[in-house]
Image (cartoon, helix red, strand yellow):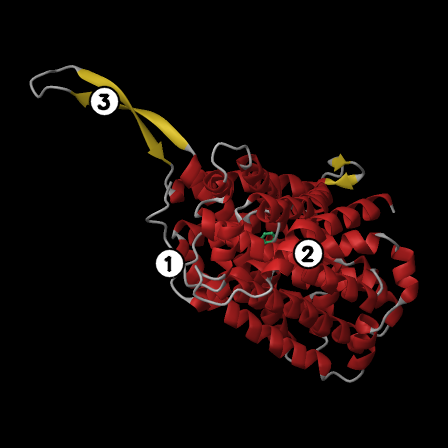
Amino acid sequence: MDQKVRVTFGTKLGIIAATAGSAVGLGNIWRFPSQTAQDGGAIFVFVYLACVAFFGMPIVLAEFILGRAGKANSAGTYRNLAPGKKFHYFGYFAIIAAFLIMGFYMVVSGWTMEYLALSITGELGRTQDFAALFDQLRNSPGTQIFWMVVFMISTAGIVAFGVKKGIELASKLMMPLLLLVMIILCIRAVTLPGAGEGLTYLFAPNPENARSAGARILTDALGQSFFSLSVGMGCLMTYASYFGKDVRLAKTAGTMATLDTSVALLSGVMIFPAAFALTTDPGSMVETLKTGGPGLVFIAIPQLLQSLPAAQLWSIFFFLLLVLASLTSTISLLEVITAFVHEEVRVTLPKPIRLRKSSTENTVLHQEYRIARPFAVTVISAGVIFLGVLCSYSLGADTSLVIFGLNFFDFLDYITAKLMMPIGGIFISLFAGWYLDKKILAAELSNAGTIPLRFFKTYRFILRFVAPVGIAVVLVCGLIG
Ligand code: PHE
């Protein structure tokens, strides 16, 4: 294993940009606001924040601890920390989750590219019927696949350059730009006349919605918080394996979770006031917001943006924001699988060797090779595109791809965010709380005793009991409720 020579991120800013870049994504801008509208406004936000604080954040920290201590991809980390045991199978589970998430995430990322292109060419501004435009895109596999491939190539290009020159540099450039664009759009939204109504809708408790959502709020909030924090499937663990030994893990986890949660709330602040202030029919806008998903970002928002002065500029801003947010997330997803393939998989190839100079005969020896990053990235990307094609067909052109009553796209979204990530979270907290040597846990949290170790007992208690039991209860209640 790479233990001694493992590359590390170069700077603290790079680490924050990369981890927050993974967390901040379509989940924040595309999913959070509509989940909130659907599940009762402030009531959902409250449950969501509780899930972040009690389950999400402690497990983010646990992934950081395991990743830095194990110094490998998500399977190798378990093998290093628990030699001879079978825990690394859980690393495989994480790789599968990353692959499945990428399958549907890439489709939406492709749409963001198409809409950015439509904004730049001005075509979006000439559109009359936004729902029809989006429908047309969903029924044009060719266009979707084209943009998905463009997005995949951009992601792969960054990851192929490796941790420092690829992931870190790209995140450091893109994250500040993303925050800037977001703040500009938020200011624009809240200064629109009539914006207050939207904010009230978003943040005031709406018991009626909450009641009709029932126990589903719990699984929705739990799934949303895990998906948004990128936690529970080895992504942060892989990134943490590139942390230097002076990185303060608890502080980094706190900063990352705060940034992610702030961006989610800010997306609500951007989208809801705009929706309410600019629509002529608040009732139907509420319905569109509630149905969420694609409708929100690709139908409601472009329509709203067009009614602003300098519409073209705002829509370029908005879709650029989406492209950047999703790119910093897709690189983290791809890195989980790439690190695994690069470090774990070996190919044995024949290597002809002439034993004596004078001899004309070759002896064939077999040599083991690692799979180089660029090659690994290419093969994985091809697999992701295949999955993405199935997803995009299942949404529009081919409605026969249905599993358990969900189309393939929604199915992948459901099993990863609502099931695999929380289950992964339970496992990580149990492993870090019960199996991992207490001394390793303490050494990682205190950077080998160089910084004070605070709340250690409480944290370990959360890992051992609060998080695993709480998540299990929420999952079971949500599923049967
Ligand atoms: N957190 C990302 C988002 O909110 C999605 C993601 C999930 C990224 C899991 C990496 C791992 O969009």
Q: Residue 266 appears at what percent x and percent y? A: 67, 72
Which of discs 3 and 2 lies nearer the camera? The answer is: 2
Q: Which residue is mark 2?
A: 55
Q: Is residue 450 left or right of residue 130?
A: left
Type of amino acid at the residue the image marks with label 1: Lys
Looking at the image, is 28 positioned above or below residue 94?
A: below
Sooner in the amino-acid sequence: mark 1 or mark 2? 2
Amino acid on which disc 3 is placed: Pro
| Residue identified by numbered label 3 | 352
- Give the residue at x 86% y 52%: 215
Name the disc covering residue 165, or none. 1
Marks 1 and 3, how far apart in space?
Answer: 35 Å
- State the residue at coordinates (85%, 62%): 287
Crowding near the residue tagged with mark 2, few <14, some 14–19, many ≥20 C-alpha atoms within 10 Å? many
Q: Residue 67 appears at what percent x and percent y? A: 49, 50
Where does the N terminus fall, quadrant-wise?
A: top left
Please tell me which residue lies in front, 193 or 368. Answer: 368
- Tag 3, which secondary structure? strand
